[in-house]
Image (spheres, rainbow, N blue to C red):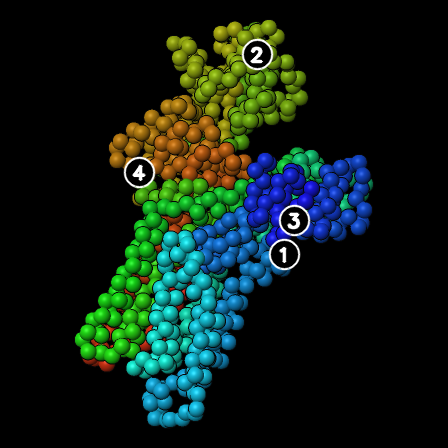
Amino acid sequence: MEHNNDSKQKYTCLMHLEVVEDRPGICPKCGMMLIPIGTKEEEHSHSQHQHTDHKKEEPSSHEEHVAPDIEIQNLQGFQKYTCPMHPQIVQDTPGKCPLCGMTLVPLTKPGAHNGHKAHASGIADFKKRFYIVLVLTIPIILLSEMIQHWLNIHFSFSGSKYLLLILSSIVFFYGGWPFLKGLVGEMRAKNPGMMTLVAFAISIAYVYSVATVFGLKGMDFFWELATLILIMLLGHWIEMKSVAGASRELELLVQLMPDDAHLVNGDKITDVKTESLKENDVILIKPGEKVAADGVIADGESYLNESMLTGESKPVEKTKGDKVIAGSINGNGAIKVTVSHGAKDSYLSQVIKLVQDAQKSKSKTQLIADRAARWLTLIAIIAGITTFLVWYFSGKDLAFSIERMVTVIVICCPHALGLAVPLVVAKSTALSAKHGLLIKNRTAFENARKITTLVFDKTGTLTIGKFQVVRYVTHNNKYTQEQILQYAAALEQNSEHPIATGITAKAKELNLQLPAVAGFEAITGKGIAGIIDKKDVMVVSPGYLQEKFTFLTKDSVVKAEETLVFVLIDDDIAGSVALADEIRPESEEAIKTLHANNIKAILLTGDNATVAKGVSERLGMDSFIAEVLPHQKLEKIKELQNKGEYVAMTGDGVNDAPALAQANVGIAVGSGSDIAAETAGIVLVNSNPKDVVSLIQFGKATYRKMIQNLMWATGYNVVALPLAAGILYKMGILLSPAAGAILMSVSTVVVAINASLLKVK
């Protein structure tokens, strides 16, 4: 099969070699990233095959070091590309920025020096152009008639004006090339902005000056042109460094994934690329190394630092059977991990995708800013032309009128306004992800400032979520206490609910043999049922008992902060099991902080009223709603909203999905590394109630930064535009195009610095 019939680069799919495309993209058959066809593609395929069968045959030392034409990382979706000037643009493939037409650069990954150079190439290019234009600007200024007049000096030679033209042409085409190229990109994207305005301004200045050389009456504009381009290059160089600093958080997330992993194959350990790992591979994590893949510890124990992933500041103890997250840092112990899935399905990959999606999504605030930036571009062009006409027809010469027009257009570039919100978005989404606050819906996040009532689910949020059996009793002489616990544990052993975990842990502690269960059935919000020893056995909540029976035994009275479940055998009350869940030490402080911010805290739980009241009173909450089934929680949220409350709700993201969707702000908590299925607008990796408070405060801080940036960018234009037009000309105050360029660049740098100061408290 012929892949390459011409000189152009072709791309194919490793799994479907019949697919051949002219450009990078996705395989239409399997969705894998296409790779360039080159001399080493067969080696690449062979290397992949060798790893697939690594349990049967160890790869040779030569094959371990084969360098494929494209990194496997690209196939797994970890390599991302962004625009140096528009950090909200993040794509999986190379290309052009849809906003300004600049070439997208790869986000840095660990060990990828080429990627780092590519990311810095945009900044380096402006720096190089700046210094070359600086050298050329010096003779241009010295040859300018106006500058000579100001300095009261005069020198010229035959052909000096043509030398001035040549030097200025180099400055225009070389120094101005990024702006001219950007103009084309913005026009193609039908999104005129800063590049369009700058290119328009320097083109007018250049064309007019060239015309004066060849006979048009007037003074040339070459020195203003050179200084304008010089300042714009300097400004962009500084801006891009500021923007890179403000939007670097996503890059840091990408860097968490290590390049290589130690693959265990019997007694042999082989270093392989992380991205080539697959399910059920076993890898070795040495002390101090980063975990290369999500998985379960098969051997060993250690403390892992997950702070960059979940926000948990203290190292977490991990032993055999515990889950580990790719990107976390191992402590002093060596561990072997059984890989759960490939890199593209890892927790870190999910987080990066969430951050990407959140940065791409636009809230109402950003849509307003975008609309304002487009209008400002139009206003700049109209104001520039109007300024030219007013000055020209009022008697000023052509050169003066053009200078005013150019200054107005340059100073009104909407770059600061256009970056006011996206920079804060880029910073906040990635920064929050590092602290375990994952934003799926930006509007919900920004609306956190409006919250008046926060509804908490009790289990695992305000409490630790680890129930312990405090007593188990029989209410029927036919059964012993141990039998009651046995039956309850037998039914609960397949459940992951905290109550079930507590009951089965107690049975295991007492070494009770659990009988077989047939016909298992879950009764949503009420309990579970099954057949044990030919008896119909149920483990149910007090709410179910009240529905079925008109009375309760004396032992049904529960102590505060206890949870009670009943065991029914053949429809008779056989016994009960009482469990207690310890309140988190952070809960009380979290409730106090909410009250300090004038936010009500309400407990909404399926637990009984006695327990709910005890927890609510101990934490100083405003009220509680108890014995509510999952489907009833939605109605309770509606009731609060009908009273005029702006409601945020915390829940587990699955059972509480309807209520989370109904709440103005839905917050799924305690998701751990399983975030893909969450439906809430915001996902908290941990269940710590202080994280909920941090989220609200961070949402408020983010919105404040947006407003500050928008006010600065808008206020700057309101003041600068009249000055550029020459409103204070009679008072001797007049801005040159270069001064306008300085002000425009400074305004953008201020916006970038302000965004970079955003912090999670």
> At 51% from the left edge and 56% from the top edge, which residue is drawn?
104
**Residue 223, image quadrant:** bottom left
What residue did someone put label 1 on? 112
Q: Is residue 610 above or below residue 411?
A: above
**Which corner quadrant holds the N terminus?**
top right
What residue did someone put label 4 on? 646
> At 59% from the left edge and 57% from the top edge, which residue is drawn?
115
Residue 4 marker: 3
Question: Cα distance, mark 2 to mark 4?
Answer: 44 Å
**Between tags 1 and 3, which lies in front?**
3
Q: Secondary structure at mark 4?
A: loop
Question: Cα distance, mark 1 to mark 3?
Answer: 29 Å
Q: Earlier in the sequence, mark 4 or mark 1?
A: 1
> At 22% from the left edge and 78% from the top edge, which residue is drawn?
396
Question: Cα distance, mark 3 to mark 4?
Answer: 61 Å
Q: Secondary structure at mark 2?
A: strand
Number of other residues with Cα within 10 Å of mark 3, as a class: few under 14, some 14 to 19, many 20 or more? some
Q: Is residue 99 above or below residue 642?
A: below
**Between tags 3 and 2, which lies in front?**
3
